[in-house]
Image (cartoon, grey):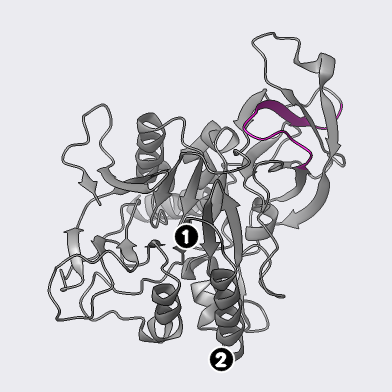
């Protein structure tokens, strides 16, 4: 009897592991807004359907309190990408809506021109010039995405539902090509992704060895996102910059930096030019590996040696990272110089939004630190003021104390 029970349990476990809990259907799902390199006049949208849906369209119009949205709706045809994951086959669709008006609220829906449409959602374009902006920054989500990371992204949206966009600093999932994990990532954020645009930089868990042994990006990355392609050749949608209301946002692909000396040189040379030719008031860089680590024994000295001098020379304001599964915020002071704040160099931040945790070392570079704490951060830019706030993931409570810097 015990032997039979063990066999049945094993069979049940195997079936559970093979089951597709997030299958595609003819109705669009995994709908994602992404910022483009021209966020005042365009917006990117990506979604997924079953493999037998061969066409994709976006209907969009200026938002109105009237339900007659179709009367003046324009139609954009989406580009299709077929993708076979470890669980299913699906078609992903991607469209960039162009010639939009700055600082304008739009309504849109995606579908296949028959009865298979999403609900109407809304987004707002950036202002054409300098204007206040706010965004939400997440460190690693990575693990237990449905059960535990969900409260972080939902709490962040609850705290600041009118943020301009979200920034994900890598390790969105744990195993890069597991469709189930991407399904949980979408489940956690749900309709938030289709109302608030995202930008993302890849982490080491979005990379791995492919069948030929090459260190390569997740097969899900490019079908899932429609990110700018203004980076160096070979780094499309992982290395890029966006100018948003007098703030330059830069994604630097940290795992690819370590891939080869050639790849690191290409990125560093590109970064130098992007920082040199920059007339924006504020500059924010996101890269997965920290310049300074929060955990004893971890150090990314090659990355620090490669780019820190550029960050200081061109006065980058914030460097937003993840990887170390703790929280730390501090300045560009060399180790051993104490905790005196500086005003002429970058503020470095390491954060974690998911439940995987490491110890925090509280090295001298850190003015603030926390361990065993799920967090999200709100960044506000208004004229000559940048305000940084760190919150725990607790819902329905005042997020006090908060970390401002």
Q: Residue at x 48, y 57 (%)?
A: 173
Q: Is residue 201 visible?
A: no
Compared to residue 311, the image places residue 8 above or below, namely above
Q: Which residue is mark 1?
A: 283
Q: Residue at x 35, y 38 (%)?
A: 151
**Residue 332, percent across and down?**
28, 73
Q: Earlier in the sequence, mark 1 or mark 2?
A: 2
Tag shown at residue 261: 2
Rounded to the nearest whole Å, what is the CA distance between mark 1 and mark 2? 26 Å
Q: Is 319 covered by the magenta stretch?
A: no
**Which span is picked out in magenta?**
97-113
Asked if labels 2 and 1 touch by Cβ distance under 8 angstroms, the answer is no
Residue in the foreground of this view, choosing between 32 and 347: 347
- Dot 1 falls on a residue whose secondary structure is strand
Tag shown at residue 258: none
Compared to residue 124, the image places residue 401 above or below, namely below
**Residue 18, percent across and down?**
57, 52
- Dot 2 falls on a residue whose secondary structure is helix
**Residue 344, percent across and down?**
31, 67
| Mark toward the viewer: 1 or 2 | 1
Compared to residue 237, the image places residue 30 above or below, namely above
């Amino acid at each position: 009897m015990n032997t039979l029970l063990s066999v049945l349990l094993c069979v049940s476990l195997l079936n559970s592991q093979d089951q597709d809990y997030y299958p595609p259907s003819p109705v669009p799902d995994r709908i994602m807004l992404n910022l483009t390199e021209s966020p005042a006049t365009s917006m990117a949208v990506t979604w997924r359907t079953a493999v037998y849906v061969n066409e994709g369209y976006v209907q969009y119009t200026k938002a109105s309190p009237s339900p007659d949205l179709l009367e003046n709706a324009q139609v954009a045809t989406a580009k299709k990408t077929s993708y076979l994951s470890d669980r299913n086959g699906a078609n992903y669709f991607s469209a960039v809506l162009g010639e939009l008006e700055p600082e304008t609220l739009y309504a849109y829906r995606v579908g296949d021109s028959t009865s298979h449409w999403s609900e109407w959602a809304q987004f707002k374009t950036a202002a054409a010039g300098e204007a206040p902006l706010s965004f939400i920054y997440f460190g690693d989500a990575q693990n237990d995405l449905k059960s535990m990371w969900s409260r972080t992204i939902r709490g962040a949206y609850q705290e600041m539902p009118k943020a301009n966009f979200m920034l994900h600093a890598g390790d969105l999932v744990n195993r890069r090509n597991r469709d189930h994990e991407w399904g949980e990532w979408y489940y956690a954020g749900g309709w938030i992704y289709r109302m608030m645009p995202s930008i993302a930089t890849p982490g080491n868990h979005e990379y791995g060895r492919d069948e030929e042994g090459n260190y390569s990006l997740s097969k899900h990355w490019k079908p899932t996102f429609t990110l700018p392609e203004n980076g160096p050749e070979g780094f499309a949608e992982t290395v890029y910059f966006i100018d948003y209301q007098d703030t330059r946002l830069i994604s630097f692909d940290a795992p690819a930096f370590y891939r080869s000396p050639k790849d690191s040189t290409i990125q560093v040379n590109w970064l130098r030019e992007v920082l040199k030719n920059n007339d924006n008031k504020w500059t924010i860089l996101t890269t997965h590996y920290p310049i300074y680590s929060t955990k004893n024994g971890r150090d990314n000295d090659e990355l620090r040696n490669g780019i820190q001098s550029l960050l200081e020379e061109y006065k980058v304001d914030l460097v937003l990272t993840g990887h170390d599964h703790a929280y730390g915020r501090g300045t560009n002071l060399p180790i051993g110089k104490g905790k005196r704040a500086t005003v002429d160099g970058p503020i470095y931040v390491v954060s974690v939004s998911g439940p995987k945790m490491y110890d925090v070392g509280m090295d001298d570079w850190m003015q603030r630190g926390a361990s065993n704490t799920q967090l999200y951060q709100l960044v506000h830019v208004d004229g000559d003021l940048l305000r940084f706030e760190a919150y725990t993931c607790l819902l329905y409570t005042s997020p006090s104390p908060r970390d401002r810097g």
